[in-house]
Image (cartoon, helix red, strand yellow):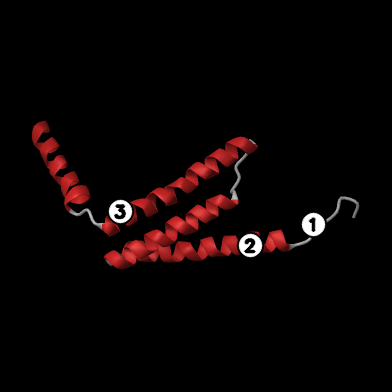
Amino acid sequence: MLIQFGSELSAYLYDVFVAKLDFWLVFGLIAQLLFAGRFLVQWIASERAGKSVMPFAFWVFSMGGGLMTLVYGIVRREPVIIFGQGLATIIYVRNIVLIFRERGRPKASASE
């Protein structure tokens, strides 16, 4: 039973990652790695600050990975990915706009 499971798992992984290997599979895998990289960026920034923070790079990775994953979903005609990343991209854009808006405001001086 264990040997049969191992053989079936091996056949499945071969089918998914080798037999279907093409540009879009590689593109989708890179998109997922970029998207997952945002958590590493957030973790490192939080460790350095000693508290939970969301650095700008988190939103850049979110936007890049999210858009790439959205393109992948559109090309592969995956409605779950299209729906999820389509909505998430709106949130990423909004957060980036808010960051730029905040950076554009003049700083209040301590004497005021």
Q: Which is more toward the observer, 51 or 57? A: 57
In percent of width and height, residue 100 lies at: 65, 62
**Where the N terminus falls, by quadrant?**
top left
Which residue in the rendered view is the most extreme toward the top? Answer: 2
> Do residues under tags 2 and 1 come within 8 Å of each other at their CB atoms?
no
**Residue type pointed to by label 2:** Leu
Q: Nearer the viewer, mark 1 or mark 3?
A: 3
Q: Earlier in the sequence, mark 3 or mark 2?
A: 3
Q: Nearer the viewer, mark 3 or mark 2?
A: 3
**Residue type pointed to by label 1:** Lys
Residue that badge 3 annotates: 26
Question: Within the image, what quadrant is residue 14 found in?
Answer: top left
Residue that badge 2 annotates: 98
13 to the left or right of 82: left
**Where the C terminus falls, by quadrant?**
bottom right
The residue sitting at 24% across, 56% down in the picture is: 22
Q: Earlier in the sequence, mark 1 or mark 3?
A: 3
The residue sitting at 70% across, 59% down in the picture is: 103
Image disc number at residue 107: 1
Which residue in the rendered view is the most extreme toward the front? Answer: 23
Which residue in the rendered view is the most extreme toward the right? Answer: 111
Question: Within the image, what quadrant is residue 48 found in?
Answer: top right
34 to the left or right of 98: left
